[in-house]
Image: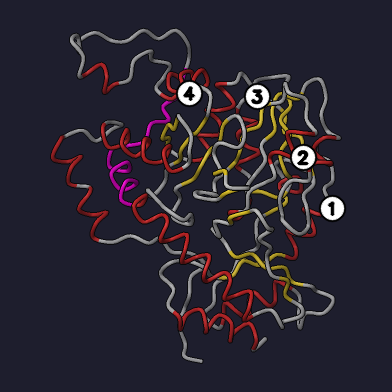
C-alpha cells in the first residue's frame, strides 16, 4: 500500500464559496443580513419546514429552542446517553437537568422504551439525536410520550436525512442542525434552528438577537434606523454572520450531490467489508434515508484481531484516521456523579469505530482504507 494520510473528515469547498464572500464585503454588511436570510429560506425549503433561523452553532440552536419553549430550573430534559456532550450541556446551560436514556445497539439512536420509562411530572422536553445521519423514529417516540413533552431534534449530523419521505427538521416540534466542518455542508462554525411552529420561531428570533423586538437588518432599512428597538426580555447573541450565510448558500447548492456520493460510498464500504467478520457495518433500515455524516462501524472485541483502541492506533500508523463513534455522556466527568448508568451507550463508546467517509476521498482512498482494515 502506498503511504498516505486519509483524514476522518474534510469539508468540500471550492472557488464558488470564495467568490460568494465578495457580496457581503461589497455590501459592507457582515453581520446577520440578506445572505443569512437567503440561506435560511433555502434551508427551510429543502427541509420542508416553514421556519429556519441561522445561529452561531448547532449548540446555540439547541439552547435557543430550549429557551424559547421555556425550559429552565426544575425542568428535566431526556437525552440519549450516546451523543456528543453538547446535547447535555445545553440542558445544563438552561438550568435544567439532563436525564439520560439508553440507546439501541444497532441504530445507535435513543431507545424509545428507555426514554418513556424516564418521564416524570418535571419532564419538559426530549432531545432525540439523529446520530451520524440516521433519523430517530420520531413517530414511535411520540407515541410513547405525553403530548406535553416537546420533541427537539438534535439533527447536527442529519442535513438532508429522511424518515419515511419526511425530512429531518420537521419531524418534531423543532430541530437544530450543525455546519461544523465535519458535517455534510459547512459554514465553518454555524447552525440552523428549524420549526413548524410560527410562535416558537417568532420567540426564537427575538431571543437570538439580544431580546430585540426588531432585527438589525429590519431596523437599519426601516424609516427610523436611528431609534433602538424595544427589549422586553433578556436574550442571546446567537446570530450568524452574512459571510457564513453566503458560504452556506453555495453549500446548499451542493447538498444533494454530496448526499448521493456519500450514500454510494457507504454502500460500497458495506459490500467490501461485509466479510470482515469482526467488524459490524452500520445499518440503514427500510424507509430511512441516511445522511452518512459518518460511517461508524462496531468492533467485536471477542473476535477482532486486537482491542478497538489498538486497531485504531495501527490504522493511524498506516495513514487511516479513525475515531470512536462518540462518547457516553453519562460516563463523562461532568455528568457521571449524578447520571444513571446506560450500559449500551458505554459499550458503544468502547466498541464503535468511525472510518473515513467524506466527499474529497478518491476511489484509491476508499480502496486504501479497506485494504488497511483487511491488513489488520
Residue receiving disc 3: 95
- Tag nearer the camera, 1 or 3: 1
Write the residue at 72% across / 43% down.
Answer: 80
Q: Quadrant of the C terminus?
A: bottom right
CA distance for labels 4 and 2: 27 Å
Do labels 4 and 2 touch, CB within 8 Å? no
**Dot 1 lies on which element?**
helix
Write the residue at 81% across / 29% down.
Answer: 119
- Tag nearer the camera, 3 or 2: 2
Residue receiving disc 4: 201
CA distance for labels 3 and 4: 22 Å
CA distance for labels 1 and 4: 37 Å
Q: Could you tell me residue 209's position as x and y percent?
A: 39, 22
Q: Which residues are magenta?
A: 235-250
Residue receiving disc 2: 100
First-in-chain label (1 vs 2)? 2
Q: Could you tell me residue 42's position as x and y percent?
A: 36, 40
First-in-chain label (4 vs 2)? 2
Write the residue at 54% across / 39% down.
Answer: 169
Looking at the image, which is closer to me, 47 or 177?
47
Amino acid at each position: 500500500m502506498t503511504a498516505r494520510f486519509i483524514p476522518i473528515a474534510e469539508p468540500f469547498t471550492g472557488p464558488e464559496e470564495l467568490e460568494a464572500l465578495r457580496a457581503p464585503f461589497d455590501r459592507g454588511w457582515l453581520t446577520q443580513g440578506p445572505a443569512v436570510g437567503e440561506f435560511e429560506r433555502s434551508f427551510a425549503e429543502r427541509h420542508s419546514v416553514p421556519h429556519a433561523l441561522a445561529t452561531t452553532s448547532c449548540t446555540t440552536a439547541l439552547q435557543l429552542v430550549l429557551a424559547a419553549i421555556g425550559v429552565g430550573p426544575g425542568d428535566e430534559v431526556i437525552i440519549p446517553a450516546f451523543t456528543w456532550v453538547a446535547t447535555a450541556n445545553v440542558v445544563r446551560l438552561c438550568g435544567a437537568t439532563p436525564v439520560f436514556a439508553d440507546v439501541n445497539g444497532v441504530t445507535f439512536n435513543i431507545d424509545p422504551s428507555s426514554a418513556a420509562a424516564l418521564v416524570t411530572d418535571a419532564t419538559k422536553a426530549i432531545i432525540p439525536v439523529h446520530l451520524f445521519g440516521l433519523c430517530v423514529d420520531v413517530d414511535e417516540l411520540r407515541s410513547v410520550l405525553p403530548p406535553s413533552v416537546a420533541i427537539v431534534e438534535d439533527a447536527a449530523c442529519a442535513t438532508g436525512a429522511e424518515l419515511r419521505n419526511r425530512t429531518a427538521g420537521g419531524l418534531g416540534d423543532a430541530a437544530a442542525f450543525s455546519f461544523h466542518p465535519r458535517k455534510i455542508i459547512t459554514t465553518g462554525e454555524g447552525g440552523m434552528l428549524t420549526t413548524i411552529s410560527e410562535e416558537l420561531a417568532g420567540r426564537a428570533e427575538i431571543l437570538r438577537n439580544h431580546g430585540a423586538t426588531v432585527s438589525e437588518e429590519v431596523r437599519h432599512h426601516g424609516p427610523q434606523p436611528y431609534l433602538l428597538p424595544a427589549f422586553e426580555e433578556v436574550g442571546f447573541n446567537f446570530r450568524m454572520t452574512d459571510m457564513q450565510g453566503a458560504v452556506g448558500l453555495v453549500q446548499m447548492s451542493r447538498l444533494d450531490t454530496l448526499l448521493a456520493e456519500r450514500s454510494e460510498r457507504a454502500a460500497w464500504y458495506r459490500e467490501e467489508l461485509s466479510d470482515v467478520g469482526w467488524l459490524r457495518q452500520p445499518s440503514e433500515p427500510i424507509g430511512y434515508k441516511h445522511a452518512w455524516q459518518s460511517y461508524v462501524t462496531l468492533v467485536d472485541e471477542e473476535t477482532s484481531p486486537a482491542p478497538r483502541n489498538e486497531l485504531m492506533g495501527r490504522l493511524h500508523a498506516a495513514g487511516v484516521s479513525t475515531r470512536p463513534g462518540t462518547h457516553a455522556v453519562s460516563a463523562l466527568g461532568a455528568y457521571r456523579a449524578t447520571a444513571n448508568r446506560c450500559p449500551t451507550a458505554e459499550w458503544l463508546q468502547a466498541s464503535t469505530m468511525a472510518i473515513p467517509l467524506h466527499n474529497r476521498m478518491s476511489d484509491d482512498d476508499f480502496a486504501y482504507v479497506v485494504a488497511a482494515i483487511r491488513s489488520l
